[in-house]
Structures are given as structure tokens and as C-alpha cells.
Amino acid sequence: MPPTQDEAKRALQTLIDQYNRMTEADRLQMTEASVVRQFIDRLLEEVLGWPIKEPARYKYELSTQAGRPDITLIPESGGTIFLEAKRFGRIAELEAARQSRDLSRTITPEQMTLPGMAVDRTPEEQQAINYAFVNNGEWAILTNFERLRLFNARKDWLVISFEKPEAYLEDFGYLWQLAYENVCNGSLNALSNQRWTKEVDTDYLAFINRERLSLARDIVTHRDANRWAFESDSAINLPLLRSVVQRFLDRLVVVRFAEDHFVIPPGTLRQFYELRKTNPYTRPLDEYLDHFFSRFNEDHNSALFSRGPVDEASFSDDALLPLIEELYRARYRSMPADIIGNTYEQYLGKALALDNGSVTTRDNLETRKKQGSYYTPQVIVRYIVDHSLGRWLYGTVDGQPDGELADGETRKTASDIRDLRVLDSACGSGSFLIYAYQVLAGFYQSELDRLEREGEARRQELVAQGMTSPLDLQVQLTPYTAERERIQHYPRIILENHLYGVDLDPQAAEIAVVNLIMRAMERRGIDKRLPLILNQNVKVGNSLIGLRPDDERLAEHRDALAALRRLRVELVNTPHTDPDHARIMDEIEAARAGLYAAFEADYAAHFSDLNRARPFHWGVEFPEAFYDADGQPLEDPGFTIIFGNPPWEIVKPDLREFYAQFDERIESKLNRRQVEQRIVELNAEDPRHERDWQATTQLIERSAAYYRATSDYTRQGRGDTATHKLFTERSWVLLADGGRLGYVVPSGIYTDLGTKDLRQMLLDEGHIQYIYSFSNERFFFPGVHHDFKFALIGAQKGVSRDGFWATFRFNPRVAVAPDELPEFLADQNNLIYVKQDSLDKFSPDSLSVMEFQTRLDYATAGRIYADYPLLGDEIEDCWNLDFVREFDMANDSGLFNQKKRGLPLYEGKMIHQYDAYFAEPRYWIEESAGIEKLRGSKSESWFHGYRFAFREVSNISNARTTIATILPPKTFAGHTLWVGAAPDTHILLFYVAMVNSFCIDWLVRFKASKHVTLFLMKSLPIPRLTAGNPVFDGLVARAARLVCTRAEFADLWQSVMGTAWVAPQTPVEATHESPLPSPLQPVIDPAARQQVRNEIDVLVAHLYELTRAEFEHILRTFPLVFPGTPAGEAKLQALLDEYDRQA
């Protein structure tokens, strides 16, 4: 029986007391074996309950391929532990314990960040870790009872350290995680995962940024040895310099990673470093590295190490010696894949640049998204990959192997996924692909385990049936053994068969390859050759420009496509030592170049510089995804999964952004005149800036023209051309039927009129799986404005559903933080199931998705919309409204004056609800000039009458969002006001009453952000009531009392009330007993106006047949109107009392 915690504590106290009774001399004389027998074994057995007398669970000095660890602990599950024992006094105090009294006894997981650039391990610590790692163990323990340190050997990081024997009792909860039963239940993984992680390893980022610049400057300094880096006019060839420096750094990183994972002997680079540093008569370090890279390529055959311009570069010892010394501070086993990916995304935000002929680094315009999103938070990456790739693999709702099975879906097997193809078409440094690799690696490992279990079960079944012949058994078990053999080297299968990436930036694509190769090297037992993915599965090009795979121009090149497909398959299956390998590589490049040449003229007509445009012909680059062995289209062509975070840019030149790379103040800190002056100065300092700006402008403008002209993009809608919209349409075309799409995009993808065609595409040709939208209030994307809204969107092609899951969290009070996201989305109570047919009801002209906060919101909106017509619907034999804009505040500013000559020009800020005199005018327009400007427009005929107006510029966080009133005759309006007319004045007032109501304002807040557009206004459900209807008449009369408070509205009053207008009287002293003004008088007293407004709001609520609870729910979403104070609650209660009175 294992000990209870109380029994364990008593046994532990006995051990500590025994240790404390020993003198220092006694301790120094005790041998390592005695420490093991008298303390460590007893700690394991008597305290932690390890069955050390069972040979299967406890082995002393077991012989392994890496030596003889003192103790090997083999639990039933939970991972093998290799324990290295030492004598008393032979384990040094941990650095962190020396630096802090608070940490002097136990260093716990949450007190440690993940090491990237780490302090050196002691030889004893590294020995324990290496024993475990080389033997495929998970955990290593270094202990002499005085101290005990647990390491995660796979990650090369310290999990916990007990620095004194007393710490075992003080932090017994941590020690108890090492108990046998707890280890079998996964306690060590849980303990290890408590370690605090950073999204970006800032030390490693600083290191690679520093060394990139150092290497580049070293090349330029040693001009004679690096003439390849200069043009004929002695100017630096910047693109080539960037490429060479990046390739050199990438090689070194791969080598160090290979050392840390025992793919090559640890310390290989260090030996060259030591040889050169200690003996000045040896060759320069650069020459040793050249020879080593060549040999590495012979052994491992990676395109990163094949000969190229980087092998012509010459680096001095001054640059290389400190670089290699620093490389050994990086612990690549301890850096999780996501942190490496995020760090490199930040790294790509800068690029080598020239400043007056010298090399520096600046913002990289090719890779930095304009909004400042340089990397995707790992929680978003994981969610999207799990709910696309994971769901496809496992058939579970959450994409996890042990998740709930989704309706109509089943778990795949290894044989089911032979044709799985996964794409990130703007892959950057590969964050999405890295995690996809992890998901696939987990799947393949589970398949190996399944085949082993099922094979063993089948063997036992056959033996039970009487089959004993080894040969017969071997034949019968072939389906299991053959499949295990096929997938045992699954890292290569994943990288060469399943994962694909494209990026416009060559450095980004190469870093993605490095990251993926490092993932493959993490698993011991990988075959010698590294995966061939650079320029094969991860490529450089413009994903948006180039032939679609179904382009009819490819039909006449079927034979060439078939040959290219065959060669790509041959390459993967040909050993790199085979003489045919190089031939196949050459033939692939020749076939690819021939096909590109065939279409060059078509694209030269659009782009003057195809090298900058970088067209990417999908069928040529990845023919196996679209064509069969004869070059004919596959029955179901395309990628199975496409995911990513595509650029979020408007395709138009941005002068400020371009010149901000030379002076960051230009982006936002200088006014227009200062910017113009600074640009003149910058161009004078370096005339190349202006030439580069002109070339950039030309490329962007020609790209925009291409996107508008080509038939490849038919779902882009109105408005500016935006890259995320283009990527969405292109990816949908590349997706196979049944395939899944997962993207991070701006929230306009589900709201804007310009993205309606994309929504229609997703809904008509498949279904939307989820839309989860958040503001950046809790800083998912550092550097992006806090109120910027982005969305996670998932969709499936070729499969219909009746709706999708959604959530929207923007307000600071409900905003979600990155570390809260997984738990938030896992809770169904936070999600709303939006029926597809409700989009037709709420927004039939746009299919916009309203941003509901709760399920009650969704149900209440359905009740309000009911079967009422939308304001924008043109209905025969019924009143309809006309809307126009009159004067543009910029283009028509020449007509304005501030001397009060003429008639006032209304702006949005001048009105409020039922109030045309909320603020004084800033501008006036001469009447004749204004009428002439309006001549021929609808406004000309409305000029002498009353017209309604609503404020366009608003905000959903304001006290009220929809602001409407009636304008007096003979006034003008600026473009921040939409104005209009109705068939009669009653309808004007009815409209104003409806849109100023809480019910409509509440609806608008789900559709708007900072603008109440005409498009939005026309999507509102406004019943077409007319005179004689009691609700219509009640609303019109009450609206008239609120609007007609000045003589300018006397005619309007007379028209709708049938009595002469009388100027309202202000009560001398308002008291509780004071009678309210007569219903046939306008009101200006605040209390009286509030009562009339309450009556309007309740009339509208009853019109929409809202329950009292639904009406109260709406009111409580206006916290600035009804704050949680006694006065606020009283104001809200007055409305509810009025609801009860009218019920």
C-alpha cells in the first residue's frame, strides 16, 4: 500500500532529522552509494511510494546508449525518469536561490520563465538531462537529498528545485507531485506546464537582430572579399545582402538545434570556435564553416545547405567568434515551437536597409501589417488549427483527440489522410504551420500506438485460435506492421506531403522552413535526410497574383503539369545519395521555368517588373494538389485545410507609411505640412527614397488595377480593395470540397457592405462554422489600437448547415484577454447560435451579422424584426423615405463663411435627439450660392420645407447612438448629416420618434461602430404605419411636442396637430405637484420632456410586442443613461412603470 500524505510527512520528517543529526564531517565521508541507500531510496519508497523493489519499476545503473544513469524509474505511465545521484555537498546552490532570500528553499515553476538564452547548466545537471533525452525519457532528476531538481529533458528546462531538505516539508504539495501514483496520473506534465511562458523570447530576439546587422556590416566592411554584394556602380545589392545574411544565420541555427537534439554531436560548432580562438595559426573560422556546411549537406541534404550565393560570402573572425559564442547561450530544446515562431515574426518586422550608404535595420514594409500585427498570438493559432485541422483529423467538436464526436464526423486513420494537404498562403515565419506540425505529429504517434495495440490484440487472437507458426503470424499481421513501417518516419511525411506555405518575403519563407525543420529534428530516430521543403512545399511568391489552378490557359499544358507532378513525387522518394536526385531537382526547376515563361506575356501586360510582382501560379507550384498523374484536374482538387492570418491592408499607396521607415515621426507625429517638408529633406539626403517610393506606388496601383480587372476575383464588392478580402476569395477557390478555412481578419468581414459578396460565397457554397469577434482592449496584438476589432472566422466548403456559432466582445467591461480565450470559447454559454435565415431577416440586402452580446439579444432582435419591412424597402402603395447628402465639408468648403452671411450650415454635432438647436453653427452659406449648388437634386425641392436629419458620426459607446431630429426650412446640411423627406410631415415625426427610441438605438449598436451609415439606417425594421393608427398618431403627437419648441416649427405644429403653435412656457418653479403642460403644447421643461420621451419609448416597445423583461434588458444596455446609482435606477424604473401603465 502506498503511504498516505500524513504517513509520507512523518517518514520525511524522520529522514530530515537523520540528516540534521549528521555532522559536516559525516556528510563529507558518505559515499554516493550510501546517499542512495540511506536517503534517496527511502525518499522514493517511504515518502513517495515508489515500488523500488519491483525490477520493472526501479533499475539501478541500467546500461543505456548514453551511459549508465544511477537510477531509472519506470512508472506504468507518465514518462520514464532518469535520476542522477550525487554525494552530499556536490550539487551547487541554484543561482536564483543565491539571488533571493524568498527563493532560498524552493524554486517553483511559476517563478521561472522559459529559458531561451539561458545560463549554463552545471555538468551534473546536463548529464542528468542528456541521459533522459538520448534515451527518449521525459524527465531527469538530479539529487543528493540535500537538493532535488526535476528537469523536463525533452524541453531542457528546470521544472522545480528544492534547495534544502526542509523545503520538502514546507512545500510538500509540490514534492507530492513526484509520488508514484501522481506521476502515473500525469502530475509531472501538469507541474511542468505551470511554468510561465512569454509570447516572445526578447533575449533571443535581441540576439538575432543584433547578429543580422553585425554580419551585414561585416560583409560591407570587407568589400574586396565580398564583391558579389555590390552592383557595378558600387552600390550595395540590398536584396542579395538580405538573402545571404539570412541564409547564413539560418544554417547556424539549424546546426545548433541539431546539436541540442543529438542529430549531430553536441559541441560541433564549438570545436571550430575553440580551435580558432586558441590557435591563431589555424585557418579562419569562415573556412571551417564552409567545409562543415558542405559536409552537413552531404549527410543531411537540406536545401538550406545547398550551394548558393551565401557560399561566396566571406565573414571575418571578428564577426563569427562572438556570434558562435552567443549561439551556445541559446538552448533550443528549451524554446517551445510557438515562442520561436512568435519571436521570428517580430524579427521579420524589421529588415536590413541602407542609410546614406551604410547598413541599418528598419521597418519591413513587405511583412509588417499596417495595423501593427507582427505575429499571431498562440491562443488564436491553436484555436484555428484545432478547429480546422484537428477537427478534420479527429472528428471532434474541439479538434482534440479525446473531445466529443461531432455529428456526422468520424476519426481518421493514417491511411485516410494520405492526400491531406494543409496550406497557409501568407505563412510568415510559420506559426500556423508549426502548430499544425505538432497536431499532425500527435496524430501519427497515436496511430503508431493504435496499430501496435490492435496488432498485438490480433496476434493474441490468432494464437488463441491455434496459430503458432511465426511465418503465418507475420503474414497475418502484415497490415499492421506494414502501415507502422510506412508512417514511422512521420516528420518527413508531414513536411513533404501535408504542409504547404507561401509568403511574399523570401526571408519569411526561409525562416518558416527553419522552424519546421527544427520541429522534425525534435523527435529522436529521424532518418538522416532532412525534409526537402524549401522551394518545394514552402515557396516564395505573391499568393494573390497568378493563375488559379482551374484557369483554362493551363489546359494546353497538361503534359507538362503531369511531368512536373511526377518529378515532385520522385524527388520525395529518391534518396539524396542517389545520382538521380540532383537530376530530378534540375528537371523540376526547368519544367517550372518553362511553364512560367509560357504565361509571362499575360502578366507583363499588367506589371512592368515581374520580379517585384512575383506571380504565383498555383497549379504549377503544387500540381499534386490539383491534377492527377495525366495532368487532368482531380475529381476533388484543392487543399483540405487552409488557415492563417493574412495581411490586413488596403491596396493603395501610403506615403506616410513608406517614409516612416526613414523617420518614424512621419507616421503620426507630424502634421501634413511638416510631413511634406520632412519628405523633401529625406529625398535630398538620399534620392533613392523617391525612386523607391515611385516604384512602390506603381506596383501597388498596378496590383489594384489587376485585382479589379481580372476575372479571378468576382466577390470583392464595393469599396477599397483589401488584402484580407482577396485572400479569403482566393483561399476559397483553392479549398477542396469538404475542406475547412480558418482565418484571422478584421471584423468588417461580417459587417461591411463591401464584403457582402464574400459572405454570400461562404453561405451559398458551404457554411460558416463560427465567427468570434473581439476588440483589442486586452492587447492580443501589441501596437494595434485598443478598439480595433478583429474576428476569428471558420468555414467549410461544400457542406451546408443552418447556422453558425458567434460571439462578440468589445466593451472594456467584457473584453476577453488572450489567456482567457480558450476557456471563454469552450463555454457554450458565451456563444450564440445564429441561424442563417436570420441574416436574411436582419440584413437581407447585405447579409451583415449583428454583434449580439447575449442569446437574449438575439431572441429580442428577432422579435423586433418580426415580419416588419426594412426602412430601405421600396413598397408600393405605402410611404417610402428619400435620403441625400447635401454639402461636402471639404470639397464644398469654398462656399462656407463664418461671418453669418446667408443661411446656417447644419453639421452632425449641431443636433441631438428631437433638438435642432443643440449647438451653434460654425458656417453659413449665401442662399443663392447654396441653392445653385443644390440645383437639380432632390434637396432643391426640399429646401423650403421640413426635412428629417440623422447624425452619421456617432459611437456605440456614447450615451445614445442614433441621433435624429427635424431641420427647420431654409437651412443647409453638411455631409455628416443625412437628410431626407417624406410624403407628409406626420411621417417625418413618426420616423424621428422611431429611430430615437431605445429599441431602435439598441439594434443600431449591434450594427454600428463609429458611424450610423445610410446603409445601416435602411436595414432597420420600421413599420409603415399611417394616420389613424393609434400608435402612429400617439408617436407623431408626442414627437411634435418635443421638436416644435421654436417658432421655426410653427407650420409643422399646425400641420400635424391642427392647432396654432403657442410658444411653450417655462414653469417658474417646478414641483412634484406641478401639472405637466397640456398635451396640445410643446414642452421644454426637462421633467415634462422626459415623461413624453418615456411614453414614446414604451409605445415603441409595445409596438414591437416586447415583454417587460425584454424591454428592461434593452434599457440596461445603456449604462450612461441609466447608471447604477439611485438616480439611474429611478429613471429606469419610471420607464418600467410607464410600460406597466400602457400594458
Image (cartoon, helix red, strand yellow):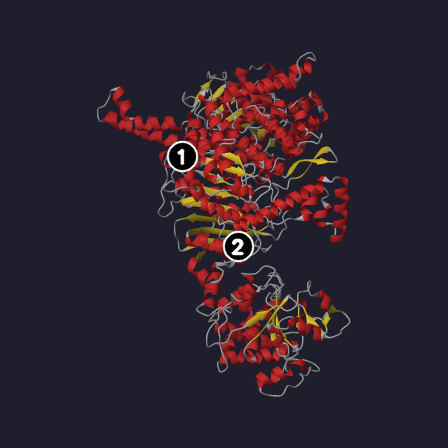
Residue for point 54% across, 42% down: 603
Place residue 564 in its image quadrant. Answer: top left
* Residue 928 in view, yes or no: yes
The disc labelled 2 sits on which kind of residue? Phe
Task: Give SS at disc 1.
Answer: helix
Q: Please name the residue that numbered disc 2 is placed on.
A: 808
Mark 1 closeness class: few <14, some 14–19, many ≥20 residues within 10 Å: some
Task: Give SS at disc 2.
Answer: strand
Which one is nearer the viewer's eye here, 1068 or 446?
A: 446
Q: Please name the residue that numbered disc 1 is placed on.
A: 559
Q: Left or right: 528 with respect to 95?
A: left
The answer to whether 296 is drawn above or below residue 749 in the figure is above
Which one is nearer the viewer's eye here, 663 or 127?
A: 663
Q: How far is the residue under mark 1 from the one under mark 2? A: 51 Å
- Nearer mark to the viewer, of 1 and 2: 1
Image x and y of residue 364, in percent? 64, 40
